[in-house]
Amino acid sequence: MQDKVFGTMARSPETPFDNEDCTLQTMTVAVLMSTFNGERYVVEQIQSILQQLPADGSLIIRDDGSTDGTISEIRKFCDARIQLIQGDNLGFAASFMHLLTKIPPSSTIILFSDQDDIWMPEKIETSRLRIDEKGPTPTLYCSALTLVTEYLKPFGRSPPWPRQPTFDNALVENIATGCTIALNRAAVSLILRTARPEMIRYHDWWCYLIVSAFGEVLYDPQPRIQYRQHRQNALGMSSGGGRYVRIMQAIKRQSWLAIMQIHIREFASDFGGDITPSQRKSLEYMSIRGVRDAIRVIFSITRRRQFLKDELLFRLLVLFEMVVRRDVPFDSAKMNS
């Protein structure tokens, strides 16, 4: 089934949206949102975006097969800046990767949005100003988050990263939370070189990995969104010790090391011929194909993660995956299934 594309103003919901509409040709800001059964919070999220979205901007929403009233809530907005795409359920990462192919040609600043947060009033303008500083260099901007309950009561914030974003760091962890990311056109062009977007498990981590290799990643320690935490979060985040509880819960659900290796192998396939010798050495070093490679990583003298305790946990995780899950993180056939 192909995605159905709709505009939301001056046309009925059933009328196909014209991608050649002249109003799109002058747009410079495009916000990409993927929704799935988000009827409870999506209205507040959209409102917080439209309040600061320029008149010539666009909010492109791809619904990932919702079965609740999400689409009905979105259609209530009578705003020409909104474009609604209805599609099959691909999963959040594939949905965002698909959205990157739907950006209007004139858009120069592209932002990701979740369906259930609240954007602070200066988020778009701050993203634009920071990215503009880098000119044509492929650039990814991301920020800290204020953690809030489902009723928007603050209870913490994301950890302030003590080290600069680097390619070595991007190989082993993601510090660019998707809903805070903004990209320039040069960065998007790089990301669209992904040969097998369906293989990407975390679109934000993938973007961080690519841009850290060929451009600049800008981290803003000032929170720019209220990151709502509730039971339906696809991933979510906690502060303090709760952050590590979340991490362990995620590890139980799926092989995190296998996901890391998928990204490394896809990156090597798509971009391996274009990276520097030092980047190639790091890429090869973190490619874990079996027990010998795992042992090498466990006893490495190089620290790649932001926090020392996270580095130690990472190595324990490699050991855990090697002993408990055995060949699963290293078997490409099982990883690709």
Image: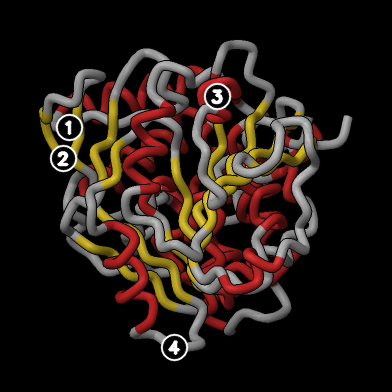
- The amino acid type, in three-letter code, at marker 2 is Arg
- The amino acid type, in three-letter code, at marker 1 is Ser
Q: Which residue is mark 1?
A: 239
Lower position in the chain sequence, tag 4 or tag 3: 4
Q: Which residue is mark 2?
A: 157
Where does residue 256 sit, x and y in percent of width and height?
51, 34
Left or right: 135 in relation to 99: left
Lower position in the chain sequence, tag 1 or tag 4: 4
Residue 254: which disc? 3
Lower position in the chain sequence, tag 2 or tag 3: 2
Q: Which residue is mark 4?
A: 135
Lower position in the chain sequence, tag 1 or tag 2: 2
Q: Are marks 1 and 2 in contact (CB under 8 Å)?
A: yes
Can you tell which of label 2 and label 3 is closer to the viewer? 2
Disc 2 versus disc 3: distance between alpha carbons? 26 Å
Q: Are marks 2 and 4 in contact (CB under 8 Å)?
A: no
Where does residue 99 sit, x and y in percent of width and height?
65, 49
